[in-house]
Image (tube, helix red, strand yellow):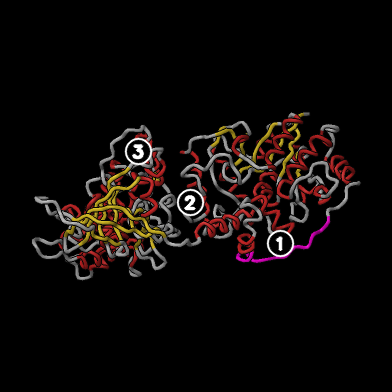
Amino acid sequence: MSAVLVTVCTNRKTIPPARRLKAQDLPSGPQSYVSETWRDWLRRATPSAAAKNLYAGRGFAEARLAAERSGADLWVLSAGLGLVQADEEVPAYDLTLSAGSESSIRQKVTDGPFDAALWWSEIGRRTRPKRSLANLVSGRPDQQIVISVSGSYLELIEKDLLSLTPSDLRRVRLIGPLSGTGIAERLQALVMPYDDRFNGPDTPLPGTRADFSQRAARHFLEQIWLGSPNAEASEHARRVRESQRSMAWPTQVERQQLADDEIVKVILSCWERADGQSARMLRVLRDEERIACEQGRFVELFKRARRLRFEQKQPDETLRLRAVRTRQGSGIDVYSFFIPGKRITEIADITRIHRDDQERLAGFQRDEIKRHVNSIAEYLDHGEVLFPNAIILAFSPEVTFTLARGGKPDGALDAGEAGTLSIPLRQEGSRVAWIVDGQQRSLALAKSCNADLNVPVVAFVAPDLETRREQFILVNKAKPLPTRLINELLPEVDTYLPRDLKERKIPSALCELLNRDPGSPFQGLIKRLSTQEPDKAIVIDSAVLDMIRASLKNPNGALAPFRSLGSGPSDTDGMYQTLVAYWSAVRQVFQDAWGLPPAASRLMHSAGIRAMGVLMDRVITRALVQPDARGHILDSLQQIAPHCRWTDGVWEDLGIAWNDIQQTPRHIRQLSQLLCHLDYTAISQRSMA
């Protein structure tokens, strides 16, 4: 009889996670929605390495060695990938079951306690046919299945194992620190009784508690199973107990129990003693400071301490350079100078768009586009290159300018004055300059081999964030900035805008108000580019904006009567009240489909929002001339409700399943036409009655 060794995955990996395979980036929601989203990300991901080469750490190395020496096939229990064969090519990812980690999948589930068994079942569906331990065991009737597992992973697979027949279950051996874990009665006889003596001074395979399961599995395969491959579980258990009989128990060390903040302070105080190395620091904490700290917890606390140490404020320095000053607008100082490219990111911050603690819009820059940055850096690395495009910065009033002495040359154009610019150097996040245009170029210059290249900079003094936003929008208007970024910034700008931007400002302002107003049915549901913790945000803002724009452009649209016909202002309040009245009725009539993620309700999908917007133009146009406008809206929606398939079933006249509706022009057009047809039919039948 041959063997199969199944071991758990590790948090440590040899390759950084793919951009869209980080649990912390997952939207929060019902567990079914979270698992479906994660499986979708996995399907789109590109494999980066064989599983056996992806996982790192001492425990996984022990498992690989055990498989090689015993001739066992190696499989991996992965919380992020499911059941994986060691030679299988898989993508790098970052997801864990550990509740205290920022990569924990548990904290993303909002519809009750995390169901580990359900997650394991759902993640197995990423492949076809579905993978499970039960299928692996039953499909190998002549092999011993040795599972090296801890209590948290047993929670994942216990239900899977219990689905096995008694004859298949007899070939399973469970190895790990499983005593006291409340293991199911049918599985108890399969647990090999390795205990804490295997961590003591006489253990044949020294290690840490973190790799206990893998070390014990290696011992079992090499010392127990190879000598009796066909023995029953009871005989294997007897041999394990016999092998530990002469081993001494480890000495119990009393260690202090401290809170996280206290441990971080100790780590900072011992930083030099451990040379800033995490492995050495853990030994210092445990052996010298006598502080109890589990390894997974330590990893997070060490990261926090390292971040705090890096962020400790250093004394201010000042960079001085030659510059030319002129004035524009209402006396605003504008400077022009040259500076080594690598120093731009030393004097200027990049303010990413986000929301502050008060949910106010902060920042304005999009995220780094790594491919763009790398292509610029590659060009710069060619050596003798020309870089005449100026980086545009905004300065705070803390920057000072000292006029140079001496007269001006005869006949020189009096367009500027030379002098010395003094720029205080600060830590990231508190600098006195901000990049308005040239973020990607600045990042490329910082990483280029040609980083000493002197590049032109134009800077203006901007006393407030609004001024910086205005210039950012105007400078980038003709460039391929994300439309959603421009749309979200527009309502925050009170200045003259080109006509095309001015026309986009009303929909953007209405979308923002719908998302923020407590009286709006969309409050908190619209996902904007600045949304950093999208716990509730489920409707993409572009869908709402498209719905509003379409209604404004349609002469018969619900919002068209409120548009300005000349130089006067548009009635945005009338527009907003119309939107609230209609969509509040939609929420009331379709309450079972409202507020669910798009994967669970196509009403909240881009296609549903836009199609219902087309229906809005028909319904509101009639409602405006009714004595009870709200009652007419509700009645119109209730007439079509029995024919709608937002969360299940098939749209009968379209022949399309509810969850096959996609954000394509064809599906949006078909769904819009169907809703309007249903409304027309209902009106016709009532007029004939």
- 314 displayed left or right of 680: right
Q: Where is residue 280 shown, x and y percent of the image?
A: 67, 51
Q: Where is residue 79 shown, x and y percent of the image?
A: 60, 46
Q: Which mark is residue 376?
A: 3
Q: Which mark is residue 26?
A: 2
At x 33%, y 68%, the residue is: 517
Q: Which mark is residue 103?
A: none
At x 22%, y 68%, the residue is: 573
Amino acid at circle 3: Ile
The residue beneath circle 1 is 291
Q: Are marks 3 and 1 in contact (CB under 8 Å)?
A: no
Count up the numbered dots: 3
Q: CA distance from mark 2 to mark 1?
A: 34 Å
* Other residues around mark 1 within 10 Å, as few (<14) / some (14–19) / many (≥20): many
Amino acid at circle 2: Leu
- Determine if the magenta segment contains residue 614: no
Task: Provide the residue span drawn in magenta.
Answer: 251-262
- 273 displayed left or right of 498: right
Judge whether 358 appears above or below 61 on screen: below
Which comes before the other along the chain, label 2 or label 1?
A: 2
Compare residues 446 and 497 and report the one nearer the observer.
Answer: 446
